[in-house]
Image: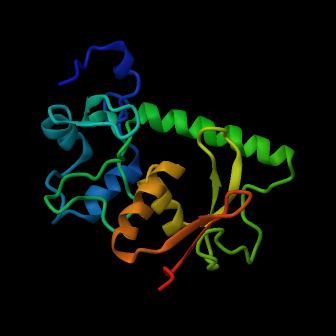
Amino acid sequence: MTNLNNSNTTSEATWGSRGFKDSERAHYQKWKGHAKYASPEEERDQYACINSKACSKCQNVKPLIYFNGNTSGRDAFDKNGYRLRRPECSLCTKTANRGKDVARRIAKVQGVSYKAPEGTCCAICGKAYNKMVFDHCHEKELFRGYLCDPCNRSLGVLGDNVQGLIAAINYLNKTEKMELTVAPGGTLSARPPHP
């Protein structure tokens, strides 16, 4: 387990000594019958300080107190009543947020709005949603387009990079056996194989 006295990690602990926001306490009240602990402090002291996981970004194993709560789904707690947490540690989350701020500033200079114009369709699935996400390249910090939440999450789960998507395509293509072609400019297309 990571040493809690390590100066590189204590400053990033979001579940540590800084206290909890009312919104975090509200999750425990809302899910009272489902949450294993009555409060975030109780979960921190009895569970999150002594259990660890690896960060999906930096791969370092850290106590759960170094992972922000994840409320992106319907429920804030897993099936056992423990608080759901982000896959990346809070330090990596901060780094990603700084990158997003850089991408926002670059887009603003280029005349691109952070908020998708009304009626904008998802750049991946083509569907129109009420809430669209400002998507950016995490390597170059450049705006890529507006995505719906499901497509944005899907990219994130697959690593938010071409290599992750290629791995998924190769996996699916084991059974679908599509012919894949790359057009000039890099656009990928798929069609059924010729008989």
Q: Nearer the viewer, residue 10 or 143?
A: 143
Q: Nearer the viewer, residue 12 or 2?
A: 2
Q: Position of residue 134 (x, y in %)?
A: 65, 57
Residue at 32% x, 51% y: name it: 25
Q: Position of residue 27 (x, y in %)?
A: 32, 58
Q: Nearer the viewer, residue 161 or 43?
A: 161
Q: Nearer the viewer, residue 82 or 88?
A: 88
Residue at 60% x, 35% y: name it: 98
From the viewer's perspective, is residue 46 above or below residue 120? above
In the figure, is residue 180 to the left or right of 85? right
From the viewer's perspective, is residue 108 above or below residue 49? below
From the viewer's perspective, is residue 193 above or below residue 135? below
* Furthest-bottom residue in this view: 195
* Furthest-front residue in this view: 195
Would residue 160 be visible to someone looking at this image? no
Residue at 47% x, 56% y: name it: 166
From the viewer's perspective, is residue 60 above or below residue 154? above
Q: Position of residue 146 (x, y in %)?
A: 67, 63
Indicate the quadrant containing the N terminus: top left, top right, bottom left or bottom right. top left
In the figure, is residue 135 to the left or right of 94? right
Residue at 40% x, 27% y: name it: 12
Report the colour scheme.
Answer: rainbow
**What is the total number of numbered labels drawn onto the structure image?**
0
Would residue 182 be visible to someone looking at this image? yes
In the figure, is residue 105 to the left or right of 1? right
Q: Position of residue 79 (x, y in %)?
A: 17, 63
Tell me the quarter of the picture where residue 174 sits: bottom left
Tell me the quarter of the picture where residue 57 sits: top left
Tell me the quarter of the picture where residue 41 sits: top left
